[in-house]
Amino acid sequence: MSKRHEKLGIKQTIQKEWMDRALRMVLAGMTEKDIRENLDQYLSTQKQSGGIGERGQKTYGMAIGILASWFAPENDLRRFRDEALKIASVIPEEEWLPLHWAVISAAYPFWFNVAKQVGRLFNLQESVTQVQIFNRVKEQYGDRETVARNARYTVRSFVAWDVLQESANKGCYKKAPSMQIHDRKLAALLIESALHATPEGKLPVTTLLKNPAFFPFELPMLSGDSLSKTSGNIELIRHGLNDEILMLKNQS
């Protein structure tokens, strides 16, 4: 199991425009050093909740760590990030949200797992509450204050990204309309992110396509064979006639 599967990591609300800014700089060919300096200066004036105001370096430094998923990925995520960059370079910026979702999910499985609990709740009911989400996350990570705090920041990020909508009742959310994913490469990237977020690096195809962590999106129906051919980083394993499993390559 990678160390990233054990860390919480989401220690503040992340705004989508920060992710957009980091991705634009990577696509422009800027060095990691220059990107960090740019973000350091920019985020020092950006509040977590949006808007402008002075912030402490420790606070926005945590944000840079998450944005680094784009410009300084872990070695085993570099090929995955590079594929995400190829897609980002040919689609409009307003369609980057699923790319950010995939990159953060792979780098910070905690994000993916909070999303999975939110999605599971939406499969059962039309609205969800913070308490319901936090209780489910604590069942997975333990009943610690740090777990609840990081889950709170993650949920607030979902709201900031407009995939969760706040209701009249405080701490209660509704699901925003799903974003249709038509591009096979983008769908395959999201699927691969789920494999990176899973300690074993493998899951049944049906589980992946219907994974509740993708609650903001509507994925196309794709076969395991199609997904493995679309992505060079995943392979298909068949057990019997109907049991198909997708697995990250070079996984034992």
Image (spheres, helix red, strand yellow):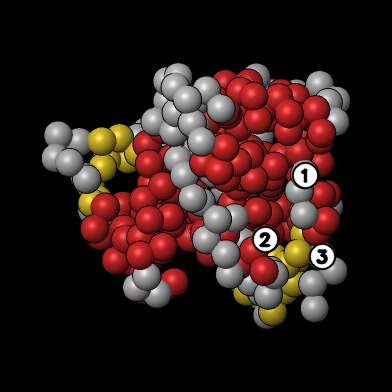
Q: Write down the residue under mark 3.
A: 249
Q: Write down the residue under mark 2.
A: 196
- Is 101 left or right of 248, judged from the image as shown? left
Q: Nearer the viewer, mark 1 or mark 3?
A: 1
Q: Write down the residue under mark 1.
A: 72
User: What residue appears at the point 80 percent right and 59 percent down from the top-left corner?
Assistant: 76
Label 3 amino acid? Lys
User: What residue appears at the point 37 percent right and 70 percent down from the top-left corner?
Assistant: 144
- Is 97 left or right of 83, judged from the image as shown? left
Mark 2 neighbour class, 10 Å CA radius: few under 14, some 14 to 19, many 20 or more: many
- Give how far across and how far down residue 100 sits, in percent: 60, 38
Label 1 amino acid? Ala
User: What residue appears at the point 44 percent right and 28 percent down from the top-left corner?
Assistant: 47
Of residues 195 and 108, the one nearer the viewer is 108
Of residues 18 and 137, the one nearer the viewer is 18
Q: Nearer the viewer, mark 2 or mark 3?
A: 2
Label 2 amino acid? His
- Is 179 left or right of 95, judged from the image as shown? left
- Give how far across and how far down residue 63 sits, in percent: 57, 40
Distance between the alpha carbons at the discs numbered 2 and 3: 11 Å
